[in-house]
Amino acid sequence: MSISTYNELKAAIASWLARDDLTAFVPDFITLFEASACRELRVRPAEAAATITPSSGTAALPADFLAVRRLTWTGSLNRDLEYVHPVWLAQNYPTSAAGTPAVYTIEGGTLRVRPVSDNPLEILYRAKTPAVSSALNWLFTNHPDVYLFGALAEASMFNKDPENAALWEGRRDKVYQSIKGADFHYRELGAPRVIGWTP
């Protein structure tokens, strides 16, 4: 059986469960798995880039934002900004003086840079993976097996079947580790290289 669409995924889960009385719950099992995967998989394919333009030093974060990887001010010379705690920002920048930003903080869904500048910012961030029910995403496209195993783990917990839950969690976690291992290898390729003798 092919698992390349959301409907095919639901059909596969129902088939593996081999129980007609659980079919209506399959979308819930998928949603619960996606919540787990979003917390677990902090990997490169889950990252996104955007350009945001602040007004008076503040800007709304992207709707799918989870965490910053890099924030760059695009002035006359690009500059990567450093994160600081909101209290530190308030204490050290009590006024909204203009200048070249050096630091930023996040309060709720708002990004603040100080000193204040309205130049565009380039943000590389960890994004929430969209639900496969609305659009195919990187995780489902590349790893449909983790969706199947994850949803079956949720179904087993729903059925209060700890033995099967442990079985499917093990299969799911093995794929998680494979995804994270591939991402670690990718990041290691970009690690700094030392040229010449070192002490």
Image (cartoon, grey):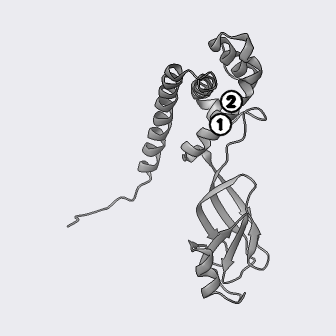
Label 1 environment density (alpha carbons within 10 Å; few <14, some 14–19, many ≥20): many
Residue at image mark 2: 30
Rendered view: 48 above or below 107:
above
Name the quarter where the N terminus is drawn: top right
Q: CA distance from mark 1 to mark 2?
A: 6 Å
Who is closer to the viewer here, 60 or 50? 60
Residue 67 locus on image (x, y percent): 61, 57
Label 2 environment density (alpha carbons within 10 Å; few <14, some 14–19, many ≥20): many
Residue kind at label 2, given as amino acid type: Ile
Residue 84 locus on image (x, y percent): 57, 74
Rendered view: 16 above or below 180:
above
Which residue is at 64% across, 87% downward? Answer: 93
Which residue is at 59% across, 44% downward? Answer: 45
The answer to which quarter of the image holds residue 31 is top right
Residue kind at label 1, given as amino acid type: Glu
Question: What SS does tag 2 mark?
Answer: helix
Verify CB contact (< 8 Å) between mark 1 and mark 2: yes
Residue 29 locus on image (x, y percent): 68, 28
Rendered view: 9 above or below 189:
above
Rendered view: 11 above or below 48:
above
Who is closer to the viewer here, 9 or 122? 9
Residue at image mark 1: 34
Which residue is at 60% across, 77% downward? Answer: 103
